[in-house]
Amino acid sequence: MNRELKKRLWVFVMCLALTLQSFAQRSWGRSEQIESIKVAFITSKLDLTSEEAQKFWPVYNNYSKEFLELLKKKKEAKYSKNSDPDEIISADLVYESKMLDLKKRYRKLYAKAIPPQKILALYKAESEFREHLYKQLNNRRKGNE
């Protein structure tokens, strides 16, 4: 086996192991399926070396966890029954600011694991994945109408 093929195989095995580990800790549901597909999508777009993958995936998994927790808190604050419109708007802006701070902090952490062109590829891959997911959801909704 040539060296490049070995690297790709190792990255795939590493990603699979990380994914399986996270799934073993919780039940299999739609969000886990989407996350698994997202990991595979990002993996294919970034073309990480084994060393990069070892450093990158733990950082990215932590980012995803923190981002989802922040998003959950934002939704809870937005839909609390005791809030007036001004409070909702203010809370929304606070959470948007926190999300931006989170992205800035992780951008620095990504730079320790992967080169800038791969960070840019990551942002592009996340955007492409979201677009793909939105299209899939819209197609399913249209099919159910």
Image (spheres, grey):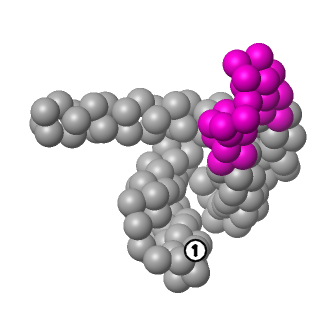
The quarter holding residue 25 reads bottom right
Quadrant the C terminus occupies? top left
The quarter holding residue 143 reads top left
Q: What residue occupies the far bottom of the structure in this picture?
A: 24
Per the rendered image, the range of residues in magenta is 71-98
Image point (73%, 35%), residue name: 82
The quarter holding residue 133 reads top left
Percent x, y of residue 31: 46, 58
The answer to whether residue 26 is left or right of residue 118 is: left
Viewer can see residue 74:
no
Reading the image, the residue beneath label 1 is 22
Percent x, y of residue 113: 78, 52
Percent x, y of residue 111: 82, 43
**Dot 1 lies on which element?**
helix
Q: What residue occupies the far front of the structure in this picture?
A: 82
Q: Nearer the viewer, residue 41 or 29?
A: 29
The answer to whether residue 141 is left or right of residue 135 is: left
Q: Residues within 10 Å of mark 1 (few under 14, many from 20)?
A: some
